[in-house]
Image: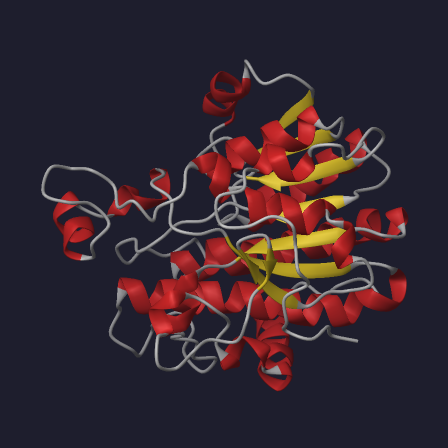
Amino acid sequence: MTSPQAPVNSPFGYRSTAREVVEGVDLAGKTVVVTGGYSGIGTETVHALAGAGAQVIVGARRPDQAEDVLEGVSGDIAILPLDLSDPASIDAFAEAVAEETAAIDILINNAAIMASPLARDARGYEMQFATNHLGHFQLAARLWPLLLADGGARVVALSSIGHRLNGLDLDDPNFERRDYDKWLAYGQAKSANALFALQLDKLGEAQGVRAFAVHPGGIATPLQRHLTMEEQRAMGWYDEEGNVHEAFKSTEEGASTSVWCAVSPLLERKGGVYCEDCDIAVPVDPENPRAGGCWPHIRDEDLAKALWRKSEELTGVAFPG
């Protein structure tokens, strides 16, 4: 059953790093798949997990760049092409992963785009929703037999504090009738990521697969590529001299909650929860909504089921069994 949305007294926190979280954890013999594991916090996620002995398979839209970025990272790392906005690429990636391993122990849906101008994939789907949510939905479905083969796999879905913007409209998820708003589209996609984890956990619990949603924190990474410096200053992310806000995390710190959800023994027999700062997040405080926490709509089980059905409809993909 879905776990309570309540902290578990983790020894790690806001400024913990991914490598601190994984210290002492032996992942030898484990296989991890990380989408976008060559940019921003993805790179550090791969670094930490490979350093703990895991075989790490990186899904990369730009494999050549991934090779350059990960060249100096020690460990067993394989890079395979993956474009989450292209259903054929997702299927090809899943087939290639199956050639690399018979089981997946950890799947980290890390890749994302944020606040991009209106763009559509080949199906006409809005690109943030298509890439951040639908692509990962199809990928998890294609990798499902490998996740079941482990008998205790974990799926980590990168959400965001941006889920508070919500924007989820299952009658018009692709902004065909609504006026496009890049932040509303981002909030929709990040809400969908969290709801995906909620429903996937229900689907997988009886078979040993648990899922978690993660807010990694504010981090200065290429995720902000679609934002001007003027926009980022207006939001308080940078000051007038170009210095990043002191509350921002480093990439090493930003990767910590993903890694914590992937390996922490405190999450045994738990799942379906939204996590931040290396712990299960508290419900949001309506009096201080920008302080973080979990908004009620991403805990709505009926909404999670409805999104699941819509995702099957849009992708034409259903989970085996």
- Taking the view exactly as shown, the residue that stands out farthest to the top is 72
Is residue 109 in view? no
Q: Is residue 305 visible?
A: yes
Q: Quadrant of residue 304?
A: bottom right
- For the N terminus, give its image quadrant: bottom right
Residue 174: percent from the left, percent from the top? 40, 69
Q: Nearer the viewer, residue 197 or 268?
A: 268
Q: Position of residue 171 (x, y in %)?
A: 45, 83
Residue at the (54%, 63%) spot, across then down: 193
Answer above or below: position of 241 versus 272: above
Residue occupying image coordinates x 66% and y 51%: 261
Residue placed most toward the observer, 56 or 287: 287
Q: Is residue 221 left or right of residue 302?
A: left
The spot of residue 285 in percent (x, y) is 43, 78
Looking at this view, name the residue that lies furthest to the left.
240
Q: Residue at x 51, y 80 (%)?
A: 297
Comparing 9 with 28, the one in front is 9
**Residue 165 image offset from top left, x and y in percent:** 36, 72
For the C terminus, the quadrant is: bottom right
Rendered view: 235 above or below 74: below
